[in-house]
Image: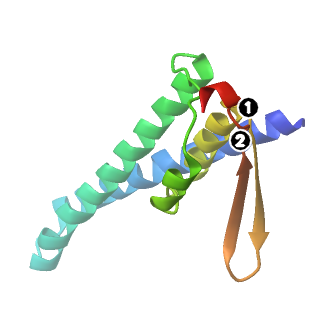
Amino acid sequence: MTGEEARADRLVSELSHELHTPLALIVGYAELLQIRTDEVTRRDAPTRILEAAERLAAAMDTLLVVLALDAGWLSVEPTPVNLETALAGPAGLPVRSVLDAYIARMLVELHGGAISAEAVAGKGLRIVFTLPLAPEASR
């Protein structure tokens, strides 16, 4: 299996998880509401269903972005950025799933950069990316 095939296989696996897990929760809590009438179930199940539906909607939105990028329906225009201003803002965007990481990789590579990740013992994952500097004339 090539690197690209392995990456596609991981993406499909993650996508399956991201879509099936909230769907299973929605179905499970809806079935529970049909068979149980206690106050705790009636109070908690709708909240759990809404949370799962929001997670499913977010996964679908992410999937649509991935498909649009892959199909070339979205284009990325490199734009010069003042690093001092950019780095003064939030520390970064949350990467909630492999789909988010896939989008980040696509965006960095579309800008001519490179991205890598490494596990840091006891701390989590360190993601490092590089982007080319803009030509002097566009700064």
Q: Which residue is mark 1?
A: 112
Determine whether 19 is above or below 70 in the image.
below
Whole-percent x, y for residue 84 in the image: 55, 54
Whole-percent x, y for residue 63 in the image: 50, 35
Amino acid type of the residue that numbered disc 1 sits on in the rendered structure: Gly
Secondary structure under badge 1? loop
Amino acid type of the residue that numbered disc 2 sits on in the rendered structure: Leu
Residue sitting at the far front? 137
Q: Which residue is mark 2?
A: 131
Q: Residues within 10 Å of mark 2 (few under 14, many from 20)?
A: few
Whole-percent x, y for residue 100 in the image: 55, 47
Q: Are marks 2 and 1 in contact (CB under 8 Å)?
A: yes
The residues bearing labels 2 and 1 have C-alpha atoms spaced at a distance of 6 Å
Residue sitting at the far bottom? 122
Whole-percent x, y for residue 29 in the image: 27, 61
Give the position of the C terminus as an image quadrant: top right
Q: Nearer the viewer, residue 32 or 4?
A: 4
